[in-house]
C-alpha cells in the first residue's frame, strides 16, 4: 500500500511519467523478443546522453511454481537473453519470509554470483479501486503459479539454485535449473 501511494505522488511529475511509459514499452518489447527503441532513441526519450545509460545483457526467466502434497516443484517454462537498459526503480532488497524463494545464481563450480528473492510465489495480488480515493487489494493463494524473474546477466552464470525459506528461517533446497536461453 505504501508503494502505491509513493507511485501516485511521483506520477504527478511529467518527467517520471515519461520514464514509466518508456520502461513499460521497453519491457513489453523485450518480452516479445524485439527492441522497439535503439540506444539513441532511449537516450533522446529519457533526456540523457551516452554517458548516463549503459546497455547490458539481462536474463528474463518464467518459472512455473507448484505446491502439491507438501512439496514444491519448479520448472523453467521460458527464458530469454536480451540486450537493453535494465533499471529497477523500486527495488527493495529483503531477506525473505517463510515460504518465499531465494534464487542463488551460480557459476560453473557452484559458487554463488548473485541472488534474488521471489516474494509469495504462490500468491497473486490484485489491486482495485471502488472510488477515486481508496485502493483495495485482495490476495489469492494458489497451488500453482507462474513467476517472472529478471537479472543482469554475465556469461559465467550457469545455474539457478532455488531454495525455500522455512518457518525457522533455514533454507530448504528445491531444485537447480540450468541457465540457458531459447
Image (cartoon, rainbow, N blue to C red):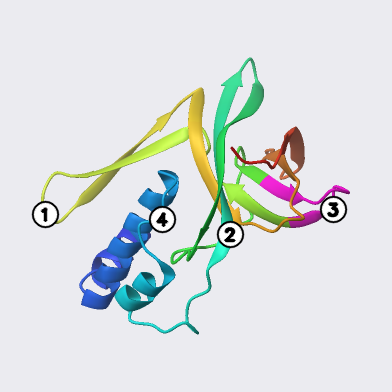
Q: Measure the alpha-carbon separation of dots 4 and 1.
A: 35 Å
Give whichever of 149, 48 is nearer the camera.
48
Q: Is residue 173 left or right of residue 24?
A: right
Name which residue lies at 72% across and 38% down.
178
Question: Real-space Cα distance between discs 2 and 1?
Answer: 40 Å
User: Is the residue under label 1 in contact with that under label 4 (CB below 8 Å)?
Assistant: no
Q: Quadrant of residue 151?
A: bottom right
Mark nearer the N terminus (4 vs 1): 4
Residue 12 visible? The answer is yes
Instruction: Please tell me whether mark 4 or mark 1 is closer to you in this view.
Output: 4
Residue topped by disc 2: 57
Q: What residue span does the magenta drawing correspond to?
A: 103-113
Which numbered disc flags the more N-terminal residue, 2 or 4? Answer: 4
Q: Earlier in the sequence, mark 4 or mark 3?
A: 4
| Label 4 packing within 10 angstroms: few (<14), some (14-19), many (20+) | some
Neighbourhood count class around disc 1 (C-alpha, 10 Å): few under 14, some 14–19, many 20 upward: few
Q: Which residue is mark 1?
A: 132
- Pointer 4 residue: 35
Give the answer, above or below, for where 140 lies relative to 150.
Answer: above
**Disc 4 to disc 3, how far (Cα)?**
33 Å
- Going from N to C along the chain, the mark reached first, 1 or 3, is 3
- Nearest-to-viewer mark from 3 and 2: 2
**SS assignment at label 4:** loop
> Which residue matches tag 3?
111
Disc 1 to disc 3, C-alpha distance? 50 Å
Q: Are marks 3 and 2 in contact (CB under 8 Å)?
A: no
Amino acid at each position: 500500500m505504501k508503494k502505491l501511494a509513493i507511485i501516485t505522488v511521483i506520477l504527478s511529475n511529467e518527467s517520471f511519467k515519461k520514464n514509466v511509459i518508456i520502461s513499460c514499452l521497453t519491457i513489453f518489447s523485450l518480452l516479445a523478443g524485439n527492441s522497439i527503441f535503439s540506444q539513441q532513441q532511449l537516450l533522446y526519450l529519457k533526456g540523457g546522453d551516452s554517458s548516463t545509460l549503459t546497455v547490458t545483457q539481462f536474463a528474463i526467466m518464467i518459472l512455473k511454481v507448484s505446491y502439491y502434497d507438501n512439496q514444491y516443484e519448479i520448472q523453467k517454462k521460458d527464458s530469454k537473453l536480451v540486450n537493453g537498459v535494465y533499471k529497477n526503480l523500486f527495488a527493495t532488497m529483503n531477506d525473505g519470509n517463510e515460504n518465499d524463494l531465494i534464487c542463488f545464481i551460480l557459476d560453473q563450480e557452484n559458487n554463488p554470483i548473485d541472488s534474488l528473492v521471489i516474494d509469495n510465489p504462490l500468491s497473486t495480488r490484485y489491486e482495485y479501486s471502488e472510488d477515486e480515493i481508496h485502493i483495495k487489494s485482495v490476495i489469492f493463494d494458489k497451488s500453482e503459479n507462474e513467476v517472472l524473474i529478471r537479472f543482469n546477466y554475465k556469461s559465467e552464470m550457469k545455474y539457478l539454485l532455488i531454495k525455500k525459506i522455512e518457518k525457522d528461517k533455514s533454507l530448504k533446497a528445491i531444485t537447480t535449473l540450468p541457465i540457458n536461453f531459447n
